[in-house]
Image (cartoon, rainbow, N blue to C red):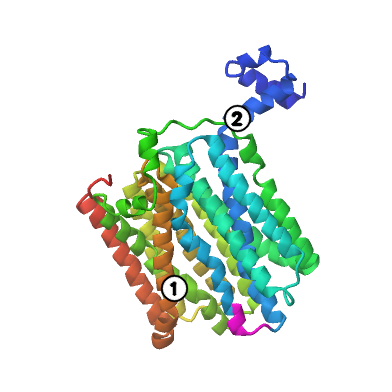
Amino acid sequence: MPTGLRSLDLSHERAFGSIFASDKPLDLQIFNRYMQTSPRHKQLTFFALYVAQSIPMSLISTLLPVVMRQQHFSLSTIGMLQLIKLPWILKILWAPLVDRHSESLASYKRWIWGSELCYALCLGLVALLQLELNFPLILALVVLAFACSATQDIATDALTSRSFGTDTVQANRLQAMGQFAGTILGGGVLMIAYSYLGWSLLFGLLALLVLALLIPLQLYREPLAPRPNTDSGGRGGLGWGSIVSFFGRPGIGGHGLMLILFNAGLVGTMAMLKPYLVDAGYALADIAWLFSLYGAGCGFVASFLAGRYLRRLSHAEGLTITSGLVVLAALVVAVLAQTGQTGLWAVMLTLGAIWGAYGAGTVMLYSVAMDAVRSGSEGTDFTLQIVLLHLSSLVVASLSGKLAGALGYVPFFYIEGALALLSLLYIYYRYHARPHKQIQ
């Protein structure tokens, strides 16, 4: 027996005592049992699931506009790429269907594997087509691929909620880290690889990578705790009515306002930083690595640290700390812009602050959202909150260009700082000065 497995056997002898009665090879038994019960494998499983959905999205949304412009597509045609985002907004419409037909670990695996197989198939077909000749078909395949990815996300979020229970900070640390890792790999590493691999080979490898990232899930065996009140009548009532009933719960209005306000002082700044750096004289290649590699890397590290240390605190304390970080980050951006600091050190400080606050804040926002899900509609409730968060962020980001164009960058960045401060004050009022009613 290899040394590593022999030591693993000795350290887990009690847990694995039953395997000695099996006819399977001892090494294989120990490995299988370890993979079924190891906390590290559990973390790897969910991290890989979020990376799997994030890498293609990041690559496609970053690569396609660049390649299309290089091939002289019109700006109006490039604008049609906004359609690829629709499935991630509309996914709330079929989230109740996923919840209704998901009870056991095996059922969640079926949803995830089915979605990712379709996802990979679409990417494989895209690899066989030429963008300049088959743009409408490629666009349709990408929209379908993103619909499959959105479905995987619903099932993964529900499975995450049920697998981690009350440890939502740990769960959403993995989610945030997976998303940032996908941005680094898809929007950074694979964008660079495109110059060497070309269209067909890159998308073919991407399809295989999506499936390879599901291997930890296939080996994952930790049973799910049974839901309370999961009789057939209760589960049969799941449907679009569960979307409406979510908003009728006590305390949900203030909860929704917190979700909207939290990112209001952040997403506008992030949306305007790219044009700000262009106006400051930075080349597009420099902006690409500053955002996709350095910025997302800062978000990855911040989400890791937030999950490691903020899980020891209450969610009220965690929200207050991360909201404070958003205020500081917004002010750093505004002050550096006002003083005209556009050197590389100042830009890296700016992006480190804003992406770090974004990473830590994402962990806490997702954790609070996951705490608010109801048994039996985990996917629907979490999806509904995240769609609300994304829609409000989209509105802020859309208005930020007009506001920054009318007022200038510096006043705009200070307005974003004021919105971040308003969010912090509201969180203090809601969770500390006047504790909110428990969401039911």
In the rendering, at what x and y percent does residue 78 appear? 61, 78
Q: Is residue 74 magenta?
A: yes
Q: Amino acid at mark 2?
A: Gln
Q: Which residue is mark 1?
A: 397
Quarter occupied by the C terminus: top left
Observer-nearest of 193 and 11? 193
Q: Earlier in the sequence, mark 2 or mark 1?
A: 2
Q: Which residue is mark 2?
A: 36
Magenta residues, start to end: 73-78
Residue plotted at (37% across, 67% down): 264
Quarter occupied by the N terminus: top right
Observer-nearest of 269 and 224? 224
Q: Is residue 359 magenta?
A: no
Observer-nearest of 361 and 147? 147
Q: Residues within 10 Å of mark 1 (few under 14, many from 20)?
A: some
Element on which disc 2 rests: helix
Q: Amino acid at mark 1?
A: Ala
In this picture, is 96 found above or below 399? above
Residue 261: name its quadrant: bottom left
